[in-house]
């Protein structure tokens, strides 16, 4: 492919920065735009504001955009991919109907039940009384989930009936907005968690890496749940046999099921898995790349990303070649003090150039803005300090060395990212 394709990436986080960075290295891509982007993305590609779907479509026509890559879940669930496809613009990301795999846990659970995809036993409820009734004679812990999107926060592990009742009342009284109008109550699965990724064009699917995320805010998996405080890849626990089981028993049956349901899934399937004693089981699907998993996936990816993403939109994925390096990658998230609760905005982050100067290091920006010559923190999760190395230990050491070079007293990070992989 000649370098003649223009790409638009939608989003403003660390995931989008990693995608822009990898696409920039593609021999197939001439120009990359990101809307809205952030302070770090703007140093790599052209950032702009496109406030409406109409503005996005108009821009795509004006700049002859050959592929739109949708990063976050919200525009997918709202149907942005459908509108782009209707305007004959190739789009990486599922349709509104297919994005229900992330947008509705009830939909996904029903699909798993119908097609025999391994997942936790569950009940689905649209009223608090029915949900409370279900609790009779149940053993604890139980997991209670808001049905819709809740920015990674709509999951409560109840260790007793009183905690379960409290969770049900809180969800139905609007703790997670409309997302909690219906809920799932499911059995508590035990085992290590793994994030598994596959690309699909709606018919065929190919494995696209796996990683282990660290969700809790503080060391030792303590503190509140977050969007993710760091990740590493590849986790040694994912053997070749396990990967094959996941593809054959979970990913491919899901692709086939979605096709049969009349809403073929095109894009990336991100399966949150629990590796139980009975084998891998699906916790949930996301309809887009993970964050911060994308940072380590892109650090290890060493093929041309553009044709792989384009084939998800246009078909022919089975003819695409992808490859990952044998190196390990570790991403340490630096967040604003107070995250995931309230935090101050506007602090200046210094020494980023020096910290990111080593060839094995790339600092991906999430909640940043460029103000004059300063990079300023404006979000909860702010930086994804990512490094590669021959081993997980080496990658981790290089990442933390870069973290220690960053001058940002208002930020914090965990000090144990990737330890579980050692």
Image (cartoon, grey):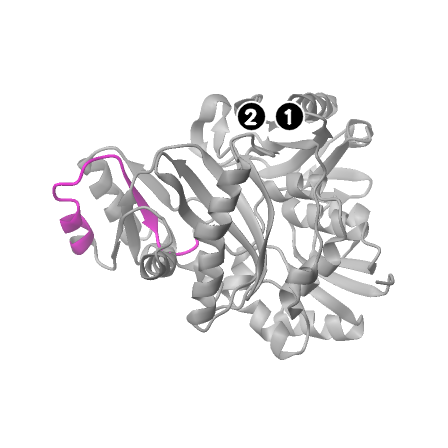
CB within 8 Å, label 2 to label 1: yes
Looking at the rendered structure, the secondary structure element under dot 1 is helix
Q: Which mark is residue 48?
A: none
Q: Decide if residue 132 is on the left or right side of residue 102.
A: left
- What residue is disc 1 on? 392
Q: Closer to the camera, 260 or 65?
A: 260
- Which residue has dot 2 on it? 421
Of the 4 image quadrants, the one containing the N terminus is bottom right
In whole angstroms, how far apart are the C-alphas of marks 2 and 1? 7 Å
The relative height of residue 91 versus residue 351 in the rendered view (above or below) is below
Residue drawn at x 49%, y 61% as measured from the top left? 255
**Residue at point 57%, 73% (across, down):** 82
Crowd class of label 2 (few under 14; some 14 to 19; many from 20; radius 10 Å): some
At which x and y percent is residue 50?
Answer: 68, 65
Residue nearest the observer in this picture, 250 or 402:
250
Specify the quadrant of the image occupied by residue 394: top right
* Left or right of 66, for residue 206: left
The range drawn in magenta is 130-149
Helix, strand or loop under label 2: helix
Q: Position of residue 239 (x, y in %)?
A: 53, 35
Q: Position of residue 204 (x, y in %)?
A: 57, 62
Please say whether residue 227 is visible from this viewpoint. Answer: no
Q: Residue extending furthest front?
A: 241
């Amino acid at each position: 492919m000649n370098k003649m394709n223009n790409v638009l990436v939608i989003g403003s986080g660390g995931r989008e920065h990693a995608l822009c960075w990898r696409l920039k290295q593609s021999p197939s891509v001439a120009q990359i735009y990101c809307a809205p982007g952030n302070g770090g993305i703007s140093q790599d590609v052209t950032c702009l504001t496109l406030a409406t779907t109409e503005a996005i479509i108009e821009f795509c026509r004006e700049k002859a955009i050959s592929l739109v890559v949708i990063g976050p879940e919200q525009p997918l669930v709202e149907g942005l991919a459908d509108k782009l496809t209707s305007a004959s613009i190739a789009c990486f990301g599922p349709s509104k109907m297919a994005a229900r795999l992330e947008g509705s846990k009830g939909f996904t659970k029903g699909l798993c039940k119908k097609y025999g995809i391994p997942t936790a036993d569950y009940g689905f409820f649209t009223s608090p009384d029915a949900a409370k009734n279900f609790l009779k004679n149940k053993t604890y812990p139980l997991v209670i989930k808001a049905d819709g999107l809740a920015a990674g926060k709509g999951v409560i592990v109840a260790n007793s009936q009183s905690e379960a009742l409290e969770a049900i009342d809180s969800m139905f009284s609007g703790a997670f907005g409309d997302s909690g109008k219906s809920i799932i109550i499911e059995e508590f699965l035990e085992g290590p968690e793994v994030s598994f990724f596959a690309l699909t064009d709606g018919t065929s699917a190919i494995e696209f890496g796996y990683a282990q995320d660290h969700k809790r805010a503080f060391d030792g998996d303590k503190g509140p749940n977050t969007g993710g405080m760091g990740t590493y890849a590849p986790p040694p626990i994912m053997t070749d046999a396990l990967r094959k089981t996941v593809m054959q028993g979970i990913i491919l049956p899901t692709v086939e099921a979605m096709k049969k349901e009349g809403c073929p899934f095109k894009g990336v399937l991100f399966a949150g898995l629990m590796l139980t004693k009975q084998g891998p089981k699906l916790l949930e699907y996301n309809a887009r790349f993970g964050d911060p998993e994308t940072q380590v996936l892109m650090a290890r990816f060493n093929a041309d990303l553009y044709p792989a993403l384009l084939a998800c939109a246009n078909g022919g994925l089975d003819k695409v070649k992808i490859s990952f390096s044998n190196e390990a990658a570790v991403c340490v998230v630096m967040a604003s003090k107070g995250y995931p609760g309230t935090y101050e905005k506007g602090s200046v982050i210094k020494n980023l150039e020096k910290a990111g100067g080593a060839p094995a290091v790339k600092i991906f920006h999430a909640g940043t803005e460029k103000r004059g010559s300063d990079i300023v923190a404006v979000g909860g999760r702010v930086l994804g300090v990512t490094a590669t190395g021959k081993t997980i230990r080496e990658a981790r050491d290089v990442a933390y060395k870069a973290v220690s070079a960053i001058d940002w007293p208002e930020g914090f990070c965990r000090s144990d990212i990737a330890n579980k992989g050692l």
